[in-house]
């Protein structure tokens, strides 16, 4: 799905098989940035590589052109196909410094944060080339700049990414959906991150990993609902 010429979204359906034979239907959005090379925000789950490469081929590009995979955080549905994509393209990888170890040793994440079906969702570990920090500026190309905004709470190293020239913000999983499974590592950090996103200036559109693309005005409402929902769950 084209958001703007330079930014495309792909919605990846996947299933989580729980130990008790239950199957949860989930989805995650990954985002492509088209420039002279291609940049990927999150890699989905293990089965996402083919969908991403097919999408690129339909638009006349190729997975070989992937130059950088930036992860909004290291949860399995965001790092799942990084290993094979990295092998095909020799792309660099980036993630917030707090979560490099979870990407470089995926088994360590499984030990610290056991998620049902983890090994089916994640292909394996990869080396991290760029450890990101809050306020980092990433110059992908002459005309494509990204800013890193640390938005912890959902996970310790969750980041949002902002393209000021296009007024587009990628929020990863930082904005929980009211009524959905609440996933947060730290309640107060999560609320603070939501307030930080709400107060951003010059944003036209918010692209989340688990919600459809929204204008900033629509997203304000979602963020208010999220804060209320988190407060309710926390109590
Ligand atoms: Zn997550």
Image: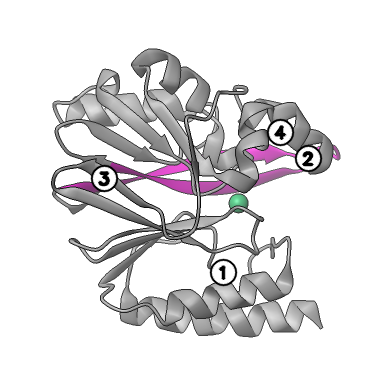
Residues at marks 2 and 3, CA–CA distance in whole angstroms = 41 Å
Q: Secondary structure at mark 2?
A: loop
Left or right of residue 234, residue 145 in this image: left
The relative height of residue 193 versus residue 29 in the rendered view (above or below) is below
Find out if the beta carbon at label 4 lies less than 8 Å from the nearest ligand 1 atom: no
According to the picture, the residue beneath numbered tag 3 turns out to be 139
Q: Secondary structure at mark 4?
A: helix
Give how far across and how far down residue 206 sits, in percent.
35, 66
According to the picture, the residue beneath numbered tag 4 turns out to be 118
Q: Earlier in the sequence, mark 1 or mark 4?
A: 4
Q: Earlier in the sequence, mark 2 or mark 1?
A: 2
Q: Secondary structure at mark 1?
A: loop
According to the picture, the residue beneath numbered tag 2 turns out to be 18
Disc assigned to residue 71: none
Toward the right, the furthest residue is 20
Left or right of residue 194, residue 69 in this image: left
Residue 40 within the segment the image draws in magenta: no
The relative height of residue 65 versus residue 138 in the rendered view (above or below) is above
User: Quick check: marks 1 and 4 in contact, CB under 8 Å?
Assistant: no
Q: Main secondary structure of the magenta part?
A: strand
According to the picture, the residue beneath numbered tag 1 turns out to be 177
- Which region is colored magenta? 6-32
């Amino acid at each position: 799905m084209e958001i703007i010429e330079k930014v495309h979204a792909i919605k990846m359906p996947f299933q989580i098989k729980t130990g008790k034979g239950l199957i949860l239907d989930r989805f995650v959005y990954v985002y492509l940035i088209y420039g002279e090379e291609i940049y990927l925000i999150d890699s989905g789950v293990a089965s996402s590589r083919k969908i991403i490469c097919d999408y690129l081929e339909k638009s006349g590009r190729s997975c070989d052109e992937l130059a950088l995979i930036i992860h909004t955080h290291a949860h399995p549905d965001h790092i799942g196909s990084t290993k094979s994509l990295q092998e095909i393209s020799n792309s660099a990888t980036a993630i917030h410094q707090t979560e490099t170890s979870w990407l470089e040793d995926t088994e360590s994440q499984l030990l610290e944060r056991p998620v049902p079906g983890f090994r089916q969702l994640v292909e394996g570990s990869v080396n991290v080339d760029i450890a990101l920090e809050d306020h980092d500026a990433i110059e992908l190309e002459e005309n494509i700049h990204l800013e890193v905004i640390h938005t912890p709470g959902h996970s310790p190293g969750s980041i949002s990414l902002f393209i000021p020239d296009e007024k587009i913000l990628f929020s990863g999983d930082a904005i929980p959906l009211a009524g959905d499974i609440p996933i947060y590592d730290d309640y107060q950090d999560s609320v603070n991150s939501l307030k930080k996103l709400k107060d951003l200036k010059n944003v036209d559109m918010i692209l989340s990993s688990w919600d459809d693309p929204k204008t900033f005005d629509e997203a304000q409402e979602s963020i208010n609902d999220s804060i209320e929902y988190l407060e309710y769950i926390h109590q």
